[in-house]
Image (cartoon, rainbow, N blue to C red):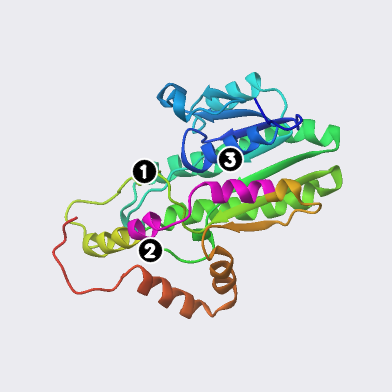
Amino acid sequence: MEGRKAARGTALITGASRGIGAAIAQALAAEGWDVVAVCRDPDRISRAQRSDGVRYLGLDLSKKQGVDSLVQTVKTVDLLVNNIGASPIGPAEEAPIEKVRELFELNFFAAVRLTQAYLPAMRKRGQGAVIFIGSMRSEAPTPFSSLYSASKAALRSFSECLRMEVREYGITVSIVAPFYIRTTLPQERQLAARSPYAAAMRRVKESRDRMIAAAAEPQAVAKTVLKILSARRPRAFYTAGRAAGLQAFLARHLPRRIVEANMARRFRLHGPKEEHTL
């Protein structure tokens, strides 16, 4: 690839068919990494969307068999970027428990399994990097995203504890929490028929969609990943997106009642009584 930098090792990125994952794959390939991009169906990625220096693998990482197949195919990596995830929207009260398990399998357990699989070789070599793509929703309450937020909060806690365990072996661990990024990640609606939450959920989704439409491009997250890799001592927690740093600071330091009130206002959570239709 013309202008490509010297090889930096093998980078494995999950959920890399579009959006944030695709942007990270492209950025790493341009920096000289040998990139393996994992997604469910690489055949759906057009030639124009593919990046030079990126090898695409089609696997379903929500299933243990998919993770096992990946580890057998790609034996060792120098950089693991756990990006894969789904983002349903719906009332916590009405979420089918099997959907909750599926979400955690994809958003949390897939990352844990892959991290466990690739850490031993990193530890033996005395070097390596693991980066998790989290979400600012782990930092502030977001109505009708309770399960997604919980899965990302679990990922945040896991990454911070893991970071302390592997530091002495030369392995760095960081998590990036994007605020709002303009992506095409579909949001599955999980809502019961004639749900009493329908009107409020509609307002929340409309607000969310407007904020995403005006948000930063996925390359903002890719730039943060490159920043982590170039840092002498990477931090545990990074943000990405417009005003993300300020949002993270406020979410952590303002009284929770103020954070909650601000989020309710932003998402127009409390509105006039409406018909229970979506």
Q: Earlier in the sequence, mark 1 or mark 3?
A: 3
The residue drawn where x is 15% and y is 68% is 274
Whole-Å distance between the Cαs marked 2 and 3? 29 Å
Q: Position of residue 167 (x, y in %)?
A: 81, 49
Element type at marker 2? loop
Q: Is residue 41 above or below residue 217?
A: above
Q: Are marks 1 and 2 in contact (CB under 8 Å)?
A: no
Residue located at (73% from left, 57% from top): 235
Left or right: residue 230 compared with residue 68: right
Q: Main secondary structure of the magenta part?
A: helix
- Residue interval drawn in magenta: 208-226
180 with respect to 237 (left or right): left
Q: Is residue 278 left or right of residue 118?
A: left
> Which mark's residue is nearer the viewer, 2 or 3?
3
- In-front residue for pair 276/133: 133
- What numbered label is drawn on residue 24? 3
Q: Which residue is mark 2?
A: 143
Q: Is residue 140 left or right of residue 143?
A: right
Q: Position of residue 60 (x, y in %)?
A: 48, 28
Tag 3: residue type? Ile
Residue at the disc numbered 1: 186
Q: Residue at x 54, y 63 (%)?
A: 244
Q: Amino acid at mark 1?
A: Pro
On screen, 119 above or below 192?
above
How many marks are shown on the rendered structure? 3
Which type of secondary structure does the marked residue at label 3 adopt?
Answer: helix
Q: Residues within 10 Å of mark 2 (few under 14, many from 20)?
A: many
Of the numbered discs 1 and 2, the one sitting upstream in the chain is: 2
Amino acid tagged 2: Pro
